[in-house]
Amino acid sequence: MRIVIALGGNALLRRGEPMTADVQRRNIRTAAEAIAPIAGDHQLVISHGNGPQVGLLALQGASYKPDEAYPLDVLGAETEGMIGYMIEQELGNLLPFEVPFATLLTMVEVDGDDPGFKNPTKFVGPIYDEGEAKRIEKEKGWVFKLDGAKWRRVVPSPAPKRIFEIRPIRWLLDHGTVVICAGGGGIPTMYAPGKDRQLMGVEAVIDKDFCSELLARELDADLFVMATDAEAVFTGWGTPEQKAIHRASPEAISAYKFPAGSMGPKVEAACQFAEATGRTAAIGALADIAAIARGEKGTLVSKEFQGVDWHS
């Protein structure tokens, strides 16, 4: 099969962990160990989140003078290189030497009039107590929102329209390459208003799940997997009545409400892929990737399913 795997940013750098290179590498090594067993049997494309990483770089940049800070599109490009390098290295340490890898800086077009620019929703960077968040908000002019019990910075998250590097990605796949691309939702770009085909960067972070869904659709992927820190999609999460969904049709799973800052976009992206392609999207734990590919674990969404089946 041709499989697109979207690694959640929090799977690479977990909540509350120090944002150091050593911690990130250790988590990427764990991800590589989960992915390696299926690499020999399938074509693989790997995307990844970058919320914690791009937020850290923005925080570092904010220590400079305002006119010296790098914009979010440039920081996104930096994280694509950093995380892609680590994934290549750790996965390459586990697979045969002959397996080629490529990390592509991936520009993704967005619409300058996207409503996402008026209502920032994408969490980036570390978590803060309320007092610290308010201090930084006043000092830097950033916007913060509650993410669980803590506060995090939020930035605009416009919808992805087009992946500019889709042709070289297809070429690499056809030649047996494991491709790492569209990291962090890709580098947000748009055509400059009033100019003839002049691309420019955009101060935003595209949602990784929606961009990965577009990537999977344009690559004619057989399976689209969103790997996270939860073993499945749960209803009633955190309550005594919580239940894990095993299989569901897009229509059936859309009848439930899921948190907008976490599982909601994943479910929406899964439904989009299933509806558009007639193939299967899956959401589940990184450690269960091989079992998810076999249809045994995680939450599977497909038009072939009727209603909702629950994990026992």
Image (cartoon, rainbow, N blue to C red):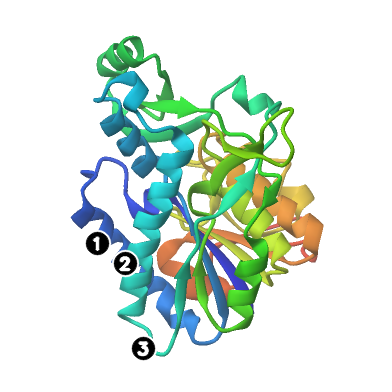
Asked whether 41 or 202 is in front, the reply is 202
Using the rendered image of the protein, determine whether residue 229 is visible from the camera's viewpoint: no
Q: Report the mark closest to the observer, 1 or 3.
A: 3
Q: Tag 1's secondary structure?
A: helix
Instruction: Categorize mark 2 by other alpha carbons within 10 Å: few (<14), some (14-19), many (20+).
Output: some
Residue at 40% x, 61% y is: 84
Q: Which residue is mark 1?
A: 26
Q: On the rendered image, what quadrant is the N terminus found in?
A: bottom right
> In the depicted view, which residue is nearer to us: 192 or 9?
192
Residue 267 percent across, percent down from the top left: 63, 48
The residue tagged with tag 2: helix, strand or loop?
A: helix
Vertical position of residue 55 compared to residue 22: above or below? above
- Marks 2 and 3 close (CB-CB < 8 Å): no
**Quarter holding the C terminus?**
bottom right
Check the image and report above or below for 132 versus 149.
above
Marks 2 and 1: CB-CB under 8 Å? yes
Task: Classify mark 3: helix, strand or loop.
Answer: loop
Which sits in the foreground, 10 or 138? 138
What residue sits 50% from the left and 56% below the top? 105
Residue annotated with mark 2: 30
> Callout 2, which amino acid?
Thr
